[in-house]
Image (cartoon, helix red, strand yellow):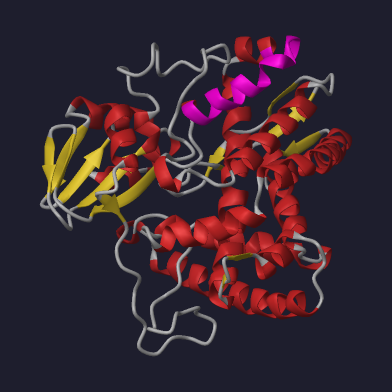
Amino acid sequence: MLENLLTPETRTDPYPFYRQVFERGPVVKAADRFFVVSGFEEASALLRNPAFGHSEPEVLPDPHENEPVDDQGRVIRSFLALDPPDHTRLRRLVSKAFTPRMVEQLAPRVEELAKELVAKALEMGEFDLMAEIARPLPVVIVSEMLGVPLADRGRFESWSHAMGRALDPSFLIAKETAAAAVAARREFVAYFRELAKERRKRPTGDLFSDLVSVSDEGDRLSEGELVITAMLLLVAGHETTTNLIGNGMLALLNHPEQHRKLAEDRSKIPNAVEEMLRYDSPVQLTTRIALRDATVGGESVGEGDQTVVLLGAANRDPRAYETPGRFDVDRPSPRHLALGQGIHFCLGAPLARLEGRTLFETLLGSGHAFHLTADPVWVKQVTLRGLDGLRLEFA
């Protein structure tokens, strides 16, 4: 079933395929021990159900020097891919450093950077939104949060791009994509191992320094956990916001009446950002394994069975939304699963929302109209939904 996600037509517009899947049922047994979940309530329930989680970390008998492993040779993973109690411990430690107050304090810098990037684009006249604004904004913010020197930020974006492209289920990833991701991961690990050593000697007040020193009743992040947490902040913090900006802008361009509403009343922007997340979600799917026998949407799922949760489909479930295929910036408090749910809800959600709101405030407050000058170019991926290119011109 999921091989249909790889066709050029579905990559450009997956929603007709999602409707076909949903018409077969909100929970479908697509193969032996393999289920696809496309209903909103069913997806929400599964993501909050402790009976579903992740597989055990891989054990590497002879790990590469830049592959973080624990004392048992298991690959160290981010808390996004862990279950309790490991997830609980890591998320608690990271949350002590990555706080709502810290995100609030970033607001002036996010606004300053958004204005700089939009002003530069205005000078260019015609520009690629993705290259000039949507990618640089979150990369610069995450880089500054982690204390990455300005000269290294190009490498930072390159690593994020390569690792983000390998987030699809393994059977959907091309060999060259996987190889590029492994190379990027190892370069990233080597870089941040050195940065961790520096921050232990000379803390600089950035988030990475805080992560190095954070403790909870004597518990601290290991070197490997530090590096993998930085990797999560980079990839998740970059890709989610970049795709929110690109997909949201395209939605506005394709719905000029909604665009006019926002331009005339920018107080609608926070609600519009939630609708952008629902309408064309930056993350389209996630996977879980049944840790024990369970039931989802009336279907019996056995221990060890695999599930794919189609977040993009769930966010357009006609049982959960009136006119789900309509982009409506006035949709009342649009709930969605774009940022996850349950214990794995996106820790960086406040930052992604801040960056999205600020960028659209800046663009729509520039006093300029803008329009497409070329067809959008979509990333060839199914887990993340985003644009490689979106060429615009200011009028």
Is 195 left, or right, of 228 in this rendering?
Answer: right
User: Can residue 388 be seen in this snapshot?
Assistant: no
- Is residue 79 left or right of 216 when viewed as pictured? left
| The N terminus, quarter of image | top left
Q: Which residues are magenta?
A: 262-278
Residue at 82 percent across and 63 percent down: it is 150
From what the image shows, is residue 72 above or below residue 99? below
In terms of depth relative to the viewer, which is nearer, 126 or 141?
Answer: 141
Specify the quadrant that holds the C terminus.
top right
Residue at the spot x=34%, y=74% of the render? 58
Q: Is residue 273 magenta?
A: yes
**Nearest the eye: 64 or 347:** 347
Residue nearer the viewer, 217 or 158: 217
Question: Which residue sits at x=63%, y=33%?
Answer: 374
User: Where is residue 349 drawn, in percent x and y?
Assistant: 58, 40
Q: Is residue 377 above or below residue 139?
A: above
Residue 372 position (above or below residue 326): below
- The residue sitting at 82% across, 41% down in the picture is 117
Question: Magenta span: helix, strand or loop, mainly?
Answer: helix
Q: Is residue 226 magenta?
A: no
Q: Is residue 258 above or below residue 209?
A: above
- Name the spot of residue 28 as percent of width and height, x first: 17, 37
The answer to whether any part of residue 288 appears in the image is yes
Q: Which image quarter: residue 46?
A: top left
